[in-house]
Amino acid sequence: MPTDDRERPVTILDFDAWKKQGRKISVLTAYDHATARWLDDAGVDCLLVGDSLGTAVQGCETTLGVTLDQMVYHAEMVGRACRRAFVVADLPFLAYQASRPQAIRSAGRILKETRCQAVKMEGGRRIAATIRAVVDAEIPVMGHVGLTPQSVRRFGGYKVQREADAIRADAQAVVEAGAFALVLECVPAALAETITAEVPIPTIGIGAGAGCDGQVLVVHDMLGLIQGFRPRFARRYAEIGDAVQQAAARFIADVQSGDFPGDSESFH
Ligand code: KIV
């Protein structure tokens, strides 16, 4: 990546330019100020305040319970941390499905009350008119098709989505509605590659193979903070959970032995 590219804040225009240049786009989720600051300093292009907040942070089985107030709260922290990364916040379940005015008001809260530059909305043809209404209100929208976790009850679980014609039509509908980028989640790699070639906006894959224009991971998966189920697509770049456990065990031992606090850690 060229140096000047790293030094100035990313804007929506970069997504279009990067697609044309074939430059891959890095996206990670973030939910708090401290983590977002580290990720921004590392040079990630885009931070997504995902409604994966529900599963990664709140310990829920789905994202369905996440509220708009919670998203605003976390988006505000992440937005305040970023100097370079473009920040997108998810609109959570039932913050946009009820009506177009509801969607504009919800998306508007993200732009007015946080420093995020865009919102993400799940769904294809079913919500294309709603995406168009939000875009027409001058609010950039990132689309999301394939496995859309807010549809988990209709899908009957978190499964790879293989209905190629339907997913291609959904992607096209999101493009025509005016989205500036498109998340493709848990679709076969060949299908994601086809869609990436067909659409003029960058595709950001998660469990969608290497043919997308960019990749996104949930930061808790990437850092090894999630215990239990490990999605096949979630490469772990660190084992922070283990480091946390080891540090806590040392602290406990030091407290019990009287070794902590030491003289230099006390006031005189
Ligand atoms: O909520 C989220 O974190 C997401 C990403 C997994 C794309 O939608």
Image (cartoon, helix red, strand yellow):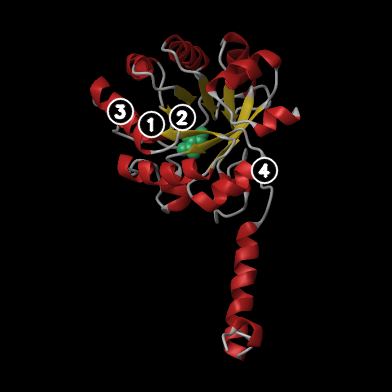
The disc labelled 2 sits on which kind of residue?
Answer: Gln
The disc labelled 1 sits on which kind of residue?
Answer: Leu
Residue 205 visible, this angle: yes
- First of labels 4, 3 by sequence position: 4
Query: Considering the numbered disc 1 on the image, is that residue within a helix, a strand or a loop?
Result: helix
- First of labels 3, 2 by sequence position: 3
Badge 4: how crowded within 10 Å, few (<14), some, or many (20+)? few
CB under 8 Å between callouts 1 and 2? yes
Q: What's the residue at 67%, 43% (across, down)?
A: 42
The residue tagged 2 is 117
The residue tagged 1 is 111
Badge 1: how crowded within 10 Å, few (<14), some, or many (20+)? many
The disc labelled 3 sits on which kind of residue?
Answer: Tyr
Q: What's the residue at 51%, 13% (across, down)?
A: 168
Query: Considering the numbered disc 3 on the image, is that residue within a helix, a strand or a loop?
Result: loop
Mark 2 CB in 8 Å range of ligand 1?
no
Query: In 3D space, how far apart are the residues under numbered discs 1 and 2 (Cα atoms)?
Result: 6 Å
Spot occupied by residue 69 in the image (x, y as percentages of width and height): 31, 43
Query: In 3D space, how far apart are the residues under numbered discs 4 and 2 (Cα atoms)?
Result: 20 Å
- First of labels 4, 1 by sequence position: 4
Badge 2: how crowded within 10 Å, few (<14), some, or many (20+)? some
Nearer-the-camera pick, 124 or 89: 89
- First of labels 1, 3 by sequence position: 3
The residue tagged 4 is 42
Residue 99 visible, this angle: no
Spot occupied by residue 28 in the image (x, y as percentages of width and height): 58, 39
The disc labelled 4 sits on which kind of residue?
Answer: Ala
Residue 81 lies, with reference to residue 59, above or below; the image says above
